[in-house]
Image (cartoon, rainbow, N blue to C red):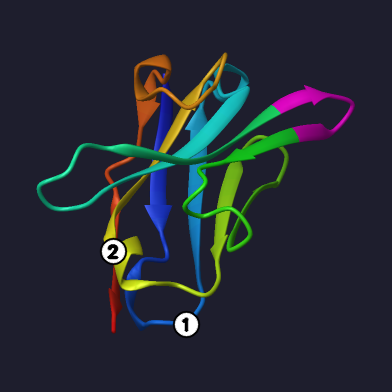
Amino acid sequence: QVQLVESGGGLVQAGDSLRLSCAASGRTFSSNAMAWFRQAPGKEREFVADTTWVGRNSYSAHYADSVKGRFTIFRANGKNALNLQMNSLKPEDTAVYYCAASVGGGSASSRYDYWGQGTQVTVSS
């Protein structure tokens, strides 16, 4: 089992920055890939970004088109922490953000075995 705990959400204004963090514990070797998803009220959960270990302390990163160039996903503390730096936030970024982990990764939520409880991000205009 892998336990994931998100932190860092809050209320900000459009154009502001925010950093989300996700701490992983337990069988972290099962978290080869980690990702952020988000879910806005009345909408389905959507992919934000993922990062996958590709060997020798290197990780790949992929982003949804809606956040590309504004958000950066990166690991810290080896495989035990995941961050999402969010810059130039827009009201449409308002959602509950979830951290997820799996062996394989990708942009489909069904590929992820472990989920955090979510953290609310609200961007006012």
Q: Which of marks 1 and 2 is nearer the N terminus?
A: 1
Residue 6 is left or right of residue 105, and the answer is: left
Neighbours of disc 1 within 10 Å: few (<14), some (14-19), many (20+): some
Q: Quadrant of residue 59?
A: top right
Q: Name the residue under label 2.
A: 94
Question: Which residue occupies the foreground of this view, 39 or 23?
Answer: 39
x, y percent for residue 122: 27, 71
x, y percent for residue 62: 62, 37
The part of the chain drawn in magenta is 53-59
Question: Which residue occupies the foreground of this view, 5 or 91?
Answer: 91
Q: Say if the magenta span includes residue 83.
A: no
Q: Residue at x 35, y 17 (%)?
A: 110
Q: Say if the magenta span includes residue 55.
A: yes
Residue type at mark 2?
Thr
Residue type at mark 1?
Gly
Residue 14 is left or right of residue 107, and the answer is: left
Q: Residue at x 47, y 82 (%)?
A: 15
Compared to residue 51, the image places residue 88 above or below, namely below
Q: Residue at x 36, y 66 (%)?
A: 9
Q: In which quarter of the image is the C terminus?
A: bottom left
- The residue sitting at the right extreme is 56
Indicate which disc residue 15 carries: 1
Helix, strand or loop: magenta stretch? strand
Q: In which quarter of the image is the N terminus?
A: top left
Q: Quadrant of residue 71?
A: bottom right
Neighbours of disc 2 within 10 Å: few (<14), some (14-19), many (20+): many
